Amino acid sequence: YPKSKDHFIRRHGVFSIIELLEMESADVVLSILQVVNQITCDNTAVLESLCFIGALPIIGQLTQCTQPPAVRAEVCTFINRLLKCSVNILDMFILSNGMKALVQLLSLPAGVAGMSAEQHVFDQCRLCLQTAIDAIYQLLHQKLRVAHNHLCVLLVVNHVGEPLSQA
């Protein structure tokens, strides 16, 4: 629905998307993330616009393990799209606590490691782990403005070892 996507952006703009992402309702946030991922799947200009006006710190906060697994899975889709963007966007991601967000994706919510977790929840958590590990790997192998040793320091400061030892 390319025309619908363009209409949504022209009609509502990216600022309204950011406002809705800041709501406390997990259902609203999940729905908005799904819309964002649909709109940005083939439109890097909209993705970059969202990044330039401040979506990265807000979306980064949605990686916390207190968020529902479905929300975190949608954030993973967004992060995977970011990894295909320009170096400027990747630098912005890092400067917006992106490494902290990736470390948070490595943390499993309470009860997921047990047998009581439903399969779809476990699959969403697996997606988070895979996305975080892949994103860290890709960022460490990109030619960014941020030095690789600084990326490693950011990982250590954000306690990357702890969730990795539990994953």
Image (tube, rainbow, N blue to C red):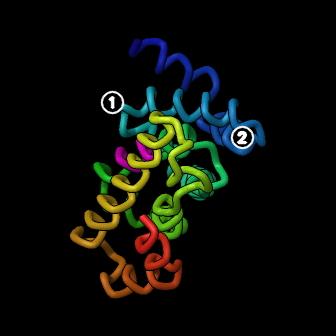
Q: Which residues are magenta?
A: 76-81
Under mark 2, the amino acid is Glu
Give how far across and how far down residue 115 sits, in percent: 51, 46
Query: Residue 157 lies in magenta, yes or no?
Result: no
- x and y, in percent, of residue 14 in the image: 59, 36
Dot 2 and dot 1 residues touching (CB under 8 Å): no
* Residue at the image position 35 percent from the left and 47 percent from the top: 80
Q: Is residue 79 magenta?
A: yes
User: Which residue, given by chain and number where applicable, does mark 1 sit on?
Assistant: 42
Residue shown at 48%/13% (left/top)? 4
Judge by depth and name the residue closer to the eye, 117 or 163. 117
Q: Who's the residue at 32% across and 53% down the image?
A: 83
Residue 79 can be seen in this image = yes
Residue topped by disc 2: 19
Query: What amino acid type is highlighted by mark number 1?
Result: Asp
* Residue 122 drawn at (x, y percent): 46, 43
- Eyeballing the image, is 58 above or below 88? above
Label 2 vs 1, first from the N-terminus: 2
